[in-house]
Image: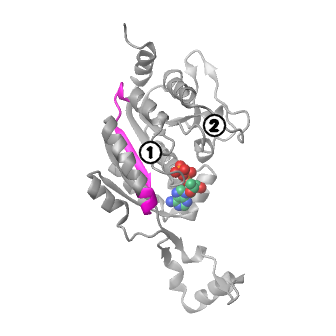
Amino acid sequence: KGPDPDLVEIADRMATVKHKVLVLSGKGGVGKSTFSAQLSFALAGVMDYQVGLLDIDICGPSIPKMLGLEGQEVHRSNLGWSLAYVEDNLGVMSIGFMLQNADDPVIWRGPKKDGLIKQFLKDVFWGELDYLVVDAPPGTSDEHITIVQLLQATGIDGAIIVTTPQQVSLIDVRKEINFCKKVGVPVLGVVENMSGLRQPLGDVRFMRVSETGEERDDTEWALEYLRKNAPEMLNLVACSEVFDTSGGGAAKMCLEMGVPFLGKVPMDPQLCKASEEGRSCFTDQRCSASAPALKKIIEKL
Ligand code: ADP
């Protein structure tokens, strides 16, 4: 029996891709896709690499929106499916581009999802890439095993795991790390996202709360008061620990599991806005709470 023809075709496509990085998370909603999107923006826009971003979160593809490519369609040519481009050096592929209607649910069983992932690697014209970033669904399901098996055949650099500082998220990250160890994918490191909320005081809403719980927005009064009496306070950044970090957060878990800790990214409403609008946070001055933290993490990779 000869070699699997699909694997031969995938090896051909992947021969022009220098680095392959998988982005994983234990739970949904921790910022995995946000990280994948901003990692791609940084590699392409800041570091000038040729980057491909593959979204295999088949049931919840949010990458098209986060890259500002909503409503785009991908086309087939004799070279294969063509990517949707943000810039000449940043191309994206997602099932989101193939849905007739963005609200359509994707209700597929494992084998069909596996087939699509295979096609993404085999039939897409990726071209010459410095980096292929793969945004995986949360957890460790069929899709993960499929992508790992297919990429391993042609070499994979490793996985970046995104988590929040909460115990409930960290418990699942341990499973994710053990999954990587079991299937032989190096863990490049863990990112602690939503690590405290940071907001310049000038962006905060100041509420007056009555004893009966009624709220009134008194921001204008408060800002005016600060401008008059303590203008230097407006340069301060308000920081709140949103999640309970008494367990030591991701840094401690990394020590225990023997994997690298890459750093913390705070919760930043401006990062949320930039990703809702499909923009890079690295060219947005307002993302001053999150962009430097993300940049520091990405430079470590
Ligand atoms: P996941 O891919 O893990 O399901 P998402 O990347 O879709 O999570 O993030 C969930 C939501 O949280 C999105 O609306 C995103 O904009 C927001 N978000 C993620 N990280 C941050 C952050 N550091 N600060 C503010 N909002 C964030």
Q: Which of the labelled discs sits on residue 24, or is there none? A: 1
| Structural distance between the alpha carbons of marks 2 and 1 | 19 Å
Task: Give the secondary structure at mark 2.
Answer: helix
Q: Position of residue 10 (x, y in %)?
A: 44, 21
Against 40, residue 16 (above or below) is above
Residue lying at 61% horizontally and 32% vertically, measured from the top left:
108
Q: Position of residue 191 (x, y in %)?
A: 40, 55
Closer to the camera, 239 or 40? 239
Task: Give the secondary structure at mark 1.
Answer: strand
Q: Which residue is mark 2?
A: 96
Q: Which residues are magenta?
A: 152-170
| Circle 1: residue type | Leu
Closer to the camera, 249 or 218? 249
Residue 162 inside the magenta-drawn segment: yes
Q: Position of residue 162 (x, y in %)?
A: 43, 52
Residue lying at 44% horizontally and 63% vertically, measured from the top left:
166
Quadrant where the N terminus is found in the figure: top left
